[in-house]
């Protein structure tokens, strides 16, 4: 059986164990997980692309069946009620074969009324996890997205099963094919639009298999962290920052590379690779991710001094907080069914979870790493006009070599992002493993 399918039945058994425990702890005897529905477009008769509830996707890749429902009760086989209408407007896909191998009871239902009937009465002891777009969506449950239950399940979700790891590994491998094609297109003078097409063609991804819109930024556009426009015009290709992934069975890879054939900027990119690799190596079980984020700021400050963007001793530059102008985002986040997997939400929900430090409010992971976590490590340096303008009015401005900044500004920025699976004795860098295998 190919990876990751061989791990699926075991994954379902583990989910049953986790959900049984969480439901019992919270006093629920049943949970409804609703796939959700496509969002309507305002004043239109169209819908936005459908994205399934990640809590349902965790049980299997039911990415194309809005209106479906999973019923989970402690000690019982979960029941998957698949919404499979007769429809001549849209294709109604078959239930993926894989789901039949997971030991779920699967029923097909032709309409929402039939699903509501199968769900039956919901009292106080039935919890519901999903989005409520219209009143009927909650099946009358009085416990809609109960925070104490979500908190337990989110904690569980930070530890990935072998099935989940295998999916992210597979997604990484496909995404790296795309990155290699994008690099080639960039080197051949392609526009942002063409580079994005090269990425998509090499991955063979549909829109639904893109875990987030690809960021394809040439030259100074690399200074916009989530740059979204895809310019069609060709020009001089100084640098490319591409942050693009692919999803397999709903699980995402989130990979960034930066390229340039300018010798000097290329050497700065190489230095960033070295810096990023050593941060990746330090991402070990038991390490507090906030410490790693601070280590990234220290290392980036030293690099900014080495490349003469900062004309000061690293200690003085650190004291002045200069690196925050050039690295204004968090070092990384959990990765899984969502690109920013439960981490960001988790931080807000759990009173015991440390909030991000005041000066690093965009840090989305603020805890010690544990085996089974999948995280990103994505340090960057950018030349962002608005942040540089702010810095000019601060005392630290005197330490900045502004002519060097002007010289590097046309290159936009550098981000190197890998996906790491934290293990008991280190980590597996799924991104670099895929590049090592495919970049020959
Ligand atoms: N692709 C978005 C991120 O790196 O977090
Ligand atoms: Mn990321
Ligand atoms: Mn990314």
Image (cartoon, rainbow, N blue to C red):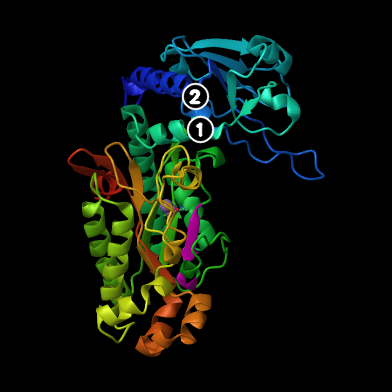
Residue at 49% across, 27% down: 61
- Nearer to the camera, 357 or 415: 357
- Nearer to the camera, 48 or 219: 48
Above or below, 440 against 402 in this view is above
Marker disc for residue 148: 1
Instruction: Check whether the beta carbons of the residues at disc 1 and disc 2 lie within 8 A of each other.
Output: yes
Looking at the picture, how far across and down is residue 230, in whole percent? 56, 60
- Between the residue at mark 1 and the residue at mark 2, the CA separation in whole angstroms equals 7 Å
Which image quadrant for residue 81?
top right
Marker disc for residue 279: none
Marker disc for residue 26: 2
Above or below, 29 against 270 in this view is above
Q: Can you name the residue that lies furthest to the right here? A: 43
Location of the N terminus by quadrant is top left
Residue at 45% across, 31% down: 153
Q: Is residue 188 visible?
A: no
Q: Which residues are magenta?
A: 214-220
Above or below, 166 against 245 in this view is above
- Element at label 1: helix
């Amino acid at each position: 059986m190919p990876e990751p399918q061989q791990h699926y039945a075991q994954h379902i058994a583990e989910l049953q164990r986790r959900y049984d425990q969480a439901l019992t702890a919270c006093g629920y005897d049943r949970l409804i997980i609703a796939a959700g529905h496509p969002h309507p477009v305002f004043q239109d008769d169209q819908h936005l692309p459908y994205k399934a509830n990640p809590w349902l996707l965790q049980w299997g890749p039911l990415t194309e069946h809005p209106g479906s429902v999973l019923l989970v009760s402690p000690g019982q086989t979960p029941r998957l009620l698949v919404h499979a209408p007769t429809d001549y407007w849209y294709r109604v896909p078959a239930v993926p074969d894989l789901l039949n191998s997971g030991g779920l009871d699967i029923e097909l239902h032709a309409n929402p009324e039939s699903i509501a009937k199968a769900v039956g009465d919901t009292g106080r002891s039935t919890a519901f996890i999903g989005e409520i777009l219209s009143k009927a969506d909650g099946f009358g449950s009085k416990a809609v997205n109960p925070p104490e239950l979500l908190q337990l399940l989110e904690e569980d979700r930070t530890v990935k099963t072998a099935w989940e790891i295998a999916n992210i590994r597979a997604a990484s491998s496909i995404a790296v094919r795309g990155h290699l094609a994008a690099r080639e297109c960039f080197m051949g003078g392609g526009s942002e639009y063409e580079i994005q097409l090269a990425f998509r063609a090499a991955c063979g991804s549909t829109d639904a298999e893109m875990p987030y819109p690809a960021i394809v930024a040439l030259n100074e556009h690399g200074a916009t962290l989530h740059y979204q426009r895809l310019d069609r015009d060709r020009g001089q290709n100084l640098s490319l920052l591409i942050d693009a992934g692919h999803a397999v069975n709903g699980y995402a890879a989130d990979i960034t590379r930066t390229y340039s054939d300018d010798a000097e900027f290329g050497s700065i990119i190489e230095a960033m690779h070295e810096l990023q690799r050593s941060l990746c190596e330090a991402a070990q079980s038991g390490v507090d991710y906030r410490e790693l984020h601070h280590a990234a700021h220290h290392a980036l400050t030293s690099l900014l001094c080495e490349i003469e963007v900062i004309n000061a001793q690293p200690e003085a530059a650190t004291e002045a907080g200069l690196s925050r102008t050039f690295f204004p985002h968090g070092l990384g986040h959990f990765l899984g069914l969502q690109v920013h997997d439960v981490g960001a939400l988790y931080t807000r929900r759990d009173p015991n979870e440390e909030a991000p430090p005041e000066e690093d409010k965009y840090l989305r992971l603020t805890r010690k790493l544990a085996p089974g976590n999948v995280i990103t490590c994505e340090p960057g340096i950018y030349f962002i006009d608005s942040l540089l303008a702010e810095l000019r009015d601060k005392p630290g401005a005197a330490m900045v070599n502004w002519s060097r900044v002007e010289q590097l500004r046309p290159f936009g920025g550098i981000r190197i992002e890998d996906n790491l699976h934290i293990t008991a004795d280190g980590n597996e860098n799924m991104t670099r493993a895929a590049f090592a295998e495919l970049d020959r």
